[in-house]
Image (spheres, grey):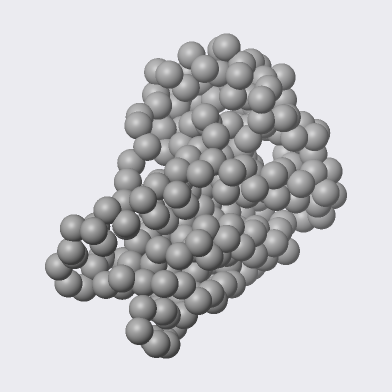
């Protein structure tokens, strides 16, 4: 396994893993021609309110959270960007989403493991999310056979908002930062042949409307997508080009 020599200062309090690492097995990567993204999830860390919430604001918060995390189009944008990057830089043929999510045998595995979306999690386009870690080695090998690909990929994103400065009244400038985890598995390999662990992207600052420290404005959804996109772009500078 080749280790890329870039290690970044980490915020260990934010994630279980204390450091960012990028590792890959060049020999096995060069043999990959086709890949299926079989697991994808996203977590948005929303700050806790700093005071009691009036009932009407509580209802507004519920509506806003449902809008920017419950809208699958936001996750679909990220899926498309990731797929294009994998195709362009790595030279891989990415199996269309419908070929994965609508495959009857994949659905069987999905149904066996899937749990309802937890609060603060973005929709996963009917793909496995955190449940992927419960799959056995044999089940990963089964997925490779079912989908007829050389590699299966798990992608996770975590977006953290950091208040940069209070502006006026209800508006504030917030920086959204994305951290990525990505693993690629192939046949007859217990460990991933590519692993991005806790990769931190550049911050994306945006003006949002906020009540009691909770951001609700429409720019939030766009800011999440932009933060993840920027992290994907940066992450691929760590990977070998095709």
Compare residues 48 and 182 and report the one nearer the observer. 48
Position of residue 63 in the picture relative to residue 83 (left or right) = left
- Residue 209 picture location, percent across and down: 41, 72
Going 62% across and 69% down the picture, which residue do you hit? 6
User: Is residue 235 something one can see in this rendering?
Assistant: no
User: Is residue 193 something one can see in this rendering?
Assistant: yes
Q: Is residue 217 above or below residue 67?
A: below
Compare residues 54 and 229 and report the one nearer the observer. 54
Position of residue 197 in the picture relative to residue 185 (left or right) = left
- Residue 14 picture location, percent across and down: 36, 65
Asked which quadrant contains residue 7, the reply is: bottom right
Q: How many labels does the image show?
A: 0
Compare residues 34 and 219 and report the one nearer the observer. 219
Q: In this view, does 12 lie above or below 58?
A: below
Q: Is residue 156 above or below residue 147?
A: below
Compare residues 120 and 167 and report the one nearer the observer. 167
Going 73% across and 29% down the picture, which residue do you hit? 95
Going 65% across and 17% down the picture, which residue do you hit? 145
* Residue at the outermost left position: 52
- Residue 118 picture location, percent across and down: 33, 41
Going 31% across and 71% down the picture, which residue do you hit? 211
Asked which quadrant contains residue 10, the reply is: bottom left
Asked which quadrant contains residue 11, the reply is: bottom left
Position of residue 156 in the picture relative to residue 211 (left or right) = right
- Residue 22 picture location, percent across and down: 60, 58
């Amino acid at each position: 396994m080749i280790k890329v020599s870039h290690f970044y200062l980490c915020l260990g309090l934010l994630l279980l893993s204390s450091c960012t690492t990028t590792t890959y097995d060049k020999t096995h990567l060069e043999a990959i021609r086709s890949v299926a993204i079989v697991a994808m999830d996203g977590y948005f860390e929303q700050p806790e309110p700093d005071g009691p919430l009036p009932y009407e604001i509580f209802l507004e918060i519920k509506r806003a959270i449902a809008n920017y995390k419950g809208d699958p189009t936001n996750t679909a944008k990220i899926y498309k960007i990731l797929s294009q990057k994998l195709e362009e830089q790595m030279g891989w043929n990415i199996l269309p989403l419908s070929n994965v999510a609508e495959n009857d045998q994949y659905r069987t595995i999905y149904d066996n493991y899937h749990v309802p979306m937890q609060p603060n999690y973005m929709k996963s386009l009917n793909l496995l999310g955190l449940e992927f870690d419960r799959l056995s080695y044999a089940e990963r090998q089964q997925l490779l056979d079912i989908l007829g690909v050389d590699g299966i990929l798990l992608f996770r994103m975590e977006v953290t908002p950091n208040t940069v400065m209070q502006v006026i009244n209800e508006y504030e400038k917030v920086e959204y930062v994305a951290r990525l985890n990505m693993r690629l598995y192939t046949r007859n390999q217990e460990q991933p042949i590519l692993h991005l662990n806790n990769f931190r992207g550049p911050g994306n600052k945006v003006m949002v409307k906020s009540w009691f420290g909770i951001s609700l404005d429409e720019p939030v959804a766009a800011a999440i997508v932009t933060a993840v996109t920027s992290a994907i772009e940066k992450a691929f500078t760590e990977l070998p080009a095709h």
